Amino acid sequence: MKKNKHILIAITIPWILFANSITLFPDTLNTTIQSGDINTETVLITNNNSFPVTLNISISDQPHTNRALPLQAQFFEPENEALVREMEPDIQYQDENGNWVDGIRCGTAPTPTNVLSLVQNEIDNNRPNRLLIRNLVNVQVAWHVIHSSAGSGNLSNDVIVDQIDVLNDAYAPYDIFFTLVSVDYTMNDNWYNDMNQYESVYKQQLNIDPIHHLNIYSGNMPGLLGWSYLPYQWPEGSYMHGVCILYSSLPGGTSYPYNAGDTATHEVGHYLGLLHTFQNGCSANNDNVSDTPQEDDGNNIYNCNNTDTCPNDPGSDPIHNFMTYTDDACLNQFTVGQGDRMEDMVSTYRPGLLENPIGPEWIYTSINEIQIPGNSSIDLDIMFDSASLIGGDYSAIVSFQEVALDTTILLPTYLHVAGISFLELNTETLIDTLFPDEFSNNYLEMTYSGSDSLIYQFENNISWVNLFGGDGIMVNGETEFITFNFNSLSMIPGIYEGDMILTTNMGSSFLHLQMVVIEPLGLDGELIPLKFSVSKNSPNPFNPITKFQIDVPVQGPMQVYVYDISGKVIATLMNTEIDPGFHTIKWNGKNDLGAQAASGVYILNVHLDGQYRSQKMLLVK
């Protein structure tokens, strides 16, 4: 009997992956490179099983290892009357039977003026310590569907995914994107029929880690389209945070004209710290954002007609802004200032969102899966590229997953960039194209946010560049513009390159300069690039097609991949031998299966015979 049982197990489960049967050496990667450099580390992967194992490779960014913690920001819990939401109806929308019903556009209570001034003080005090190197925010969404026993409100996953796409369309231009990580369903007639009354009950039971997740609750209000809380109204970990929305306001729902998904866009704006554009009416600080024109709080906030209810202030009413009360068809924009305010709010009051994983640009491999034969070992090269980084510490997790056997091996990875902390440059490379015997000015913007004074000096050893303002002292919050005057006097057509060293009392970094000199009447022969480079994609943001140029100096194998923000390859644009020259490549926004990719941030990786370039692209529908 034992022998037969053994044979049965062997036939049913031919391969069993035991603990520690796949090993990594080293089991942790630590590397230090100068700002602007590229380095390669090798990991030995050993398969101690008798059968081959295929591992999928993905990389996710991790929180900055020694980032300055936010200040102990003061929170201001809403008054009890703000939780009751006994407000007068101000809109009409259709119910699921096509009947017009009276409703309330937004149940988020306005913030008292005295509280707003205190919040602004917290933001200003926190700004010098804000996280500088995480320029993307991954808002992980935990969706809670509350529905009735009769099935009303029982949303499909497809509708929820469509709503996430609407959010990404609105917020991606401001480096905020949304990842749906969980959906759960709760049948409860009491909760469904009056989400207002039972709010604290279902939130306490259903919430998932409010520090790192946006919890969205859909159901019936009744009469309300939605509400949220401002970031400073509860402590960061309070279960009261989150967004509540009418289930029929999602894309394709029945609550016309509020059924395109922008109720969620509006309420998430509150969750990220934005006020109504009409708050405080025509006062100078209305919503505490400088580039949203003042708007009087009257019936005009509901219609899409061009109005100017504050004629003494610049600009017409922001009728298309997501934070006003016009219907969904009229809403299509935030402002740059609103983007900046959301960044301030996240840094001060929702720093946990900055700890969510993203696909980093500074670490990558040339392959996304690897097969190791039984009882064998294979080397894997992992590349570190600090071209887009400032000095400091970075960390990531490289994951090796065996899908069929549901096993994952993790490789913690740490990078130290020996550069200049708290100094942000608007570019790492200055590039210009000139005819012979021309001059042109290029500008470098430097912004400093450290507490001690920064003493800096550029070392200029490039003959075709004159430097103006190349040395000085900067203090916290100061911005300097350095002028680099390129000249092509007596120079023949070609590509000229050089590096300038920026030395400071807090470290050093490199600035790469490139000047392309072209013949005014054209060239008889074809130029060959002197250096492998990849241009910025254009347009960016794009929809649905973007393109970029790859300069290939020598023949060699080239791979061009598009990664999603989680670090997975979604599209292979090229994988072939390439000839020297200037090559233009397009991406149509589709994955390898031919499906249109969702709105959001994607990472372009170009590999050429051991050289690597990486950059972000923004797809907006």
Image: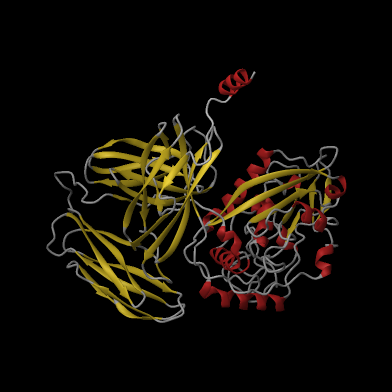
Residue 434 at x, y = what percent? 22, 59
Quadrant (top left/top right/bottom left/bottom right) for the N terminus: top right
Task: Judge from the rendering whether residue 348 lies leftward or rightward of residue 34; answer left or right.
Answer: right
Question: Closer to the camera, 91 or 202?
Answer: 202
Query: Looking at the image, which residue sits at the far front?
Result: 2
- Using the rendered view, name the quadrant where residue 418 is placed: bottom left
Q: Residue at x 84, y 61 (%)?
A: 88
Residue 346: tell me if it is visible.
yes
- Using the rendered view, name the quadrant where residue 575 is placed: top left
What is the count of numbered marks?
0
Q: Residue at x 57, y 74 (%)?
A: 126
Question: Closer to the camera, 474 or 296?
Answer: 474
Query: Looking at the image, which residue sits at the far right?
Result: 190
Residue 620 at x, y = what percent? 52, 48
500 w.r.t. 556: above or below: below
Task: Judge from the rendering whether residue 265 lies leftward or rightward of residue 362; answer left or right.
Answer: right
Task: Judge from the rendering whether residue 237 lies leftward or rightward of residue 173; answer left or right.
Answer: right
Residue 619: tell me if it is visible.
no
Question: Closer to the camera, 420 or 172?
Answer: 420
Residue 407 at x, y = what percent? 54, 39
Residue 188 at x, y = what percent? 84, 45
Task: Judge from the rendering whether residue 204 lies leftward or rightward of residue 278; answer left or right.
Answer: right
State how the image is colored: secondary structure
